[in-house]
Structure formats: C-alpha cells, structure tokens
Image (spheres, rainbow, N blue to C red):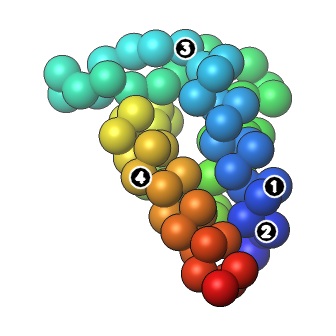
Amino acid sequence: MANNDALYAVADLVLQFAYRSKYYNAEALDDGGLSALENAFYVLETNGCKVNRNGTIQLSNLLRFMDELEKDENAQGD
C-alpha cells in the first residue's frame, strides 16, 4: 500500500483537476480520458477508494477516502 501522504496528494489532485459529472444524480468526478487522471483513479481504486462501474468516483466517496487517510495519519502520529 502506498504512503498516506502520497495517496492524499493523488486524491487532492483528482479533486482539483478531474471533470465534474453525475453518477445516479450524485456529484461525481471523471477522468475525461486524460491518462494522468486515469492513472490517479487507478491508484486510488487499488488503495481502497470506491470507483463506480462507469469509471467515475463519487465526490462523497473521494472525500470519505481523504478523511480516512487523515485519520490514519493522525492515529499513527499519536
């Protein structure tokens, strides 16, 4: 599994640069066919972030994933 700081950075980049879309009426993020974002989505998925069947990530799932990374980081620092 990748380092939490690196994963958080990848998630933050996806949050900032991915294209906004909808998945079942919920706000989602799409890679838009950009290879760098496709790779970022793959890294997030292989490290536990839920990716939808159509390849998007629901915004709420990405934010939850980022929160879990922060909690893990804080727990390790204690």
The residue furthest left is 25
Ranked by sequence position, the earlier of labels 3 and 1 is: 1
Q: Which residue in the protein does label 2 denote? A: 2
Please say whether residue 52 is visible from this viewpoint.
no
What's the amino acid at mark 4?
Arg
Q: Which residue in the protein does label 1 denote? A: 6
Q: Is residue 52 left or right of residue 34?
A: left
- Front disc: 3 or 1: 1
- Front disc: 3 or 4: 4
Q: Is residue 61 left or right of residue 3?
A: left
Question: Closest to the observer: 29 or 71?
Answer: 71
The residue furthest front is 78
Q: Is residue 46 above or below residue 66?
A: below
What's the amino acid at mark 2?
Ala
Q: What is the distance, in whole Å, between disc 1 and disc 2 at their CAs? A: 7 Å
Give the numbered dot on residue 19: 3
